[in-house]
Image: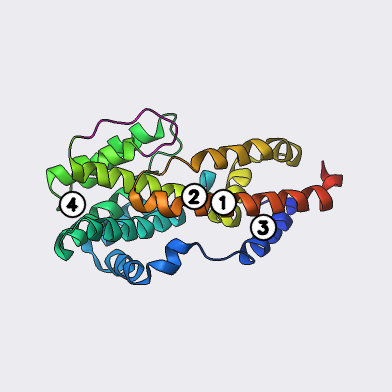
Amino acid sequence: MGMEPVYDSIRKHARRIVSQFPIPGFYRNFPQETLWSRRNFKSDKTIISLRRQVAGNLNNDFGHGLKHAIRVALDIGVLMVVEGRRTGCTDALITSRITLGQCAALLHDIARGQKNHAEEGAAMAAKLLASHPISSRGKKDICLAIRDHEAFRKRIPIHTPQGVLLSDCLYDADKFRWGPDNFTDTVWRMVTFNRMPFKAFLRQYPKGMEGISRIRDTFRTHTGKAYGPEFIDLGLSIGNRLYATILEEYSENS
């Protein structure tokens, strides 16, 4: 499905604006942890198999397709490493947690098109995980994390520290996407999927920015609280600059 010419033009402006901002500190400060996460994502047999399974089930409507899932998976791996080391976990335990986290990331939007996508996604995830060599506790934690990954919803009760950590890391990695990623990719997939008229896009833009700002204080992990607000601040700065450009250069389209 193609994009309206006006959106294609605005997206180019957005990507140019994003390129003028610094890379978030989360990526600058954890290079080794990032490498660990990437290696696990590329080499773990469960992740490789699960990625093949979900590839055909993740649509890019609302910008939450496979590309989004992979970005969340890579970031949740970093969070698992940083949080694990902070609490004195062994490397072996951290690696196992990276795998669980990356499974949750690949599956968290599997039912994005459903009304209650977190709950429906957890049910679908349970079925997809049945054939994988993951402990019953691990599978339960993944499904609970998926049910608990939406913002501004009542939290799902999780009764183990490991389950809470998995849920919190999934939430934070997912909400990092509300930063620069929102303007390089997500917004344009949303308007394309919805076939949104430009006037409606312009009318809803301020409300969308307000939604981004509300995410700022919702991060859950120690690391997410330290680095998440920067993602949001970058997203807001990028979005505001883009909005000024849109009003200046595309007013005739409205």
Q: Confirm whether the magenta stretch covers residue 178.
A: no
Q: Which of pointers 3 and 4 indicates the residue nearer the eye?
A: 3
At mark 3, the secondary structure is helix
How far from the left and from the top, in percent, is residue 14? Answer: 67, 58
User: Mark 4 — residue?
Assistant: 132
The residue shown at (19%, 43%) is 161
C-beta proximity under 8 Å, tags 3 and 4: no
Q: How many marks?
A: 4
At mark 2, the secondary structure is helix
Amino acid type, mark 1 = Asp
The span shown in magenta is 149-158
User: Which callout, 4 or 2, points at the residue further toward the start of the chain?
Assistant: 4
User: Which callout, 4 or 1, points at the residue further toward the start of the chain?
Assistant: 4
Residue density around tag 1, few if under 14, some if 14–19, many if 20 or more, within 10 Å: some
Image quadrant containing the C terminus:
top right
Give the alpha-carbon distance from disc 1 to disc 3, as whole Å: 16 Å
Position of residue 133 in the picture relative to residue 60 (left or right): left
The residue shown at (58%, 44%) is 190
Q: Which of pointers 4 and 2 indicates the residue nearer the eye?
A: 2
Q: Which of pointers 4 and 1 indicates the residue nearer the eye?
A: 1
Residue 164's place in the image compared with 180, above or below, is: above
User: Mark 3 — residue?
Assistant: 14
Viewer can see residue 84: yes
